[in-house]
Image: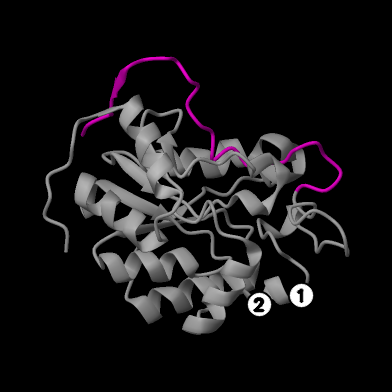
């Protein structure tokens, strides 16, 4: 259990240096830095229900960390089942953010902006009172994620940590096998990237892993992972509760 006090400021230079150092650090060490720096009660882990690699690593570092799952109301049954099985297995401090239903469903009338109106708004609410959050983004997932930093600032001014940024697909599959982890059954059915059921399809051989997301549109990201622009500021003040 982390007892370190949360810090109110962080310098851009420090984040850059940490990012460089973390390139060769194990994911568990990166998570531990986050809990020791901000305190387990001032950060959370975004849990998508696709696999439990980051869940396994973070829960072993500090069982008090809050995990956040955004229930849009349109998830595959397999995703909801994976989340529940993970909650039980790890006794997760799980917070489920439920998106209010609309009639007709927002994805039918405005599929491009559905994510920002639903998922992003719920993540914003979940991050109230937090100083940092962790996600499972990896550079190998898609060309659009090739430059994902291990640590940086999001557009809210919160520190965002991606402990698995350097992991390859083989690293993930190897960790899953070595630790007998839970994984969403859809992954083995041709869904390497899983979102809401109406906007996700299995991918064909040779396609990008995220080609099955928002098919027929130019959309490539849901908006949860926007980074802060490089302002050149020598330091930034974190949003404090």
The secondary structure that dominates the magenta segment is loop
Give the secondary structure at mark 2.
helix
With respect to residue 98, does 14 lie above or below? above
Residue ID at (16%, 64%): 1
Position of the C terminus, as image quadrant, is top left
The residue positioned 66% from the left and 53% from the top of the image is 141
Compared to 208, does 228 lie above or below?
Answer: above
Q: Nearer the viewer, residue 216 or 122?
A: 216
- Above or below: residue 21 compared with residue 57: above
Q: Is residue 17 left or right of residue 230?
A: left
**What mark, if any, has residue 67 been given in the picture?**
none
Query: Pointers 2 and 1 in contact (CB under 8 A)?
Result: yes
Q: CA distance from mark 2 to mark 1?
A: 7 Å
Q: Nearer the viewer, residue 141 or 157?
A: 141
Q: Position of residue 58 (x, y in %)?
A: 35, 64
- Quadrant for residue 3, please give it: bottom left
Dot 2 corresponds to which residue?
185
| Horizontal and vertical percent position of residue 125 | 38, 40
Judging by the rendered image, the residue that carries numbered circle 1 is 189
List x then y, in percent, for residue 101.
57, 49
Asked if the magenta segment contains residue 200, the reply would be: no
Q: Which residues are magenta?
A: 214-241
User: Does the magenta run of residues contain 232?
Assistant: yes
Disc 1 secondary structure class? helix
Residue 23 coordinates in the image, percent (x, y): 46, 49
Estimate how packed mark 1 is, as few (under 14), some (14 to 19) or many (20 or more) residues with alpha carbons within 10 Å. few
Judged left or right of residue 7, residue 57 is right
Q: Crowding near pointer 2: few (<14 within 10 Å), some, many (20+)? A: some
> Does residue 203 appear to the left or right of 35 in the view shown?
right
At horizontal 51% and vertical 83% (from top left) the residue drawn is: 178
- Residue 144 showing in the rendered view: yes
In this view of the protein, which residue sits in the foreground, 173 or 106? 173
């Amino acid at each position: 259990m982390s007892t370190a006090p949360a810090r109110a400021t962080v310098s851009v230079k420090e984040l850059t240096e940490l990012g460089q150092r973390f390139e060769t650090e194990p994911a568990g060490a990166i998570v531990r830095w986050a809990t020791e720096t901000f305190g387990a009660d001032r950060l959370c882990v975004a849990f998508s229900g696709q696999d439990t690699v980051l869940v396994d690593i973070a829960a072993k570092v500090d069982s008090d960390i809050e995990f956040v799952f955004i229930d849009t109301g349109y998830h595959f049954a397999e995703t909801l089942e994976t989340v529940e099985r993970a909650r039980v297995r790890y006794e997760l401090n799980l917070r489920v953010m439920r998106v209010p239903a609309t009639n007709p469903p927002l994805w039918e009338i405005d599929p491009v902006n559905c994510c920002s109106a639903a998922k992003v708004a719920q993540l914003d609410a979940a991050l109230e009172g937090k100083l940092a959050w962790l996600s499972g983004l990896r550079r190998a997932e898609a060309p659009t994620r090739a430059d994902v930093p291990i640590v940086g600032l999001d557009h809210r001014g919160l520190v965002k940590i991606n402990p698995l940024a350097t992991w390859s697909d083989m690293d993930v599959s190897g960790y899953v096998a070595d630790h007998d982890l839970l994984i969403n059954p859809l992954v083995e059915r041709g869904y390497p990237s899983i979102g809401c059921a109406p906007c996700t399809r299995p991918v064909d051989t040779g396609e990008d892993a995220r080609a099955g997301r928002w098919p027929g549109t130019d959309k490539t990201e849901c908006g949860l992972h926007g980074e802060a622009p490089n302002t050149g500021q020598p330091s930034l003040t974190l949003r404090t509760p």
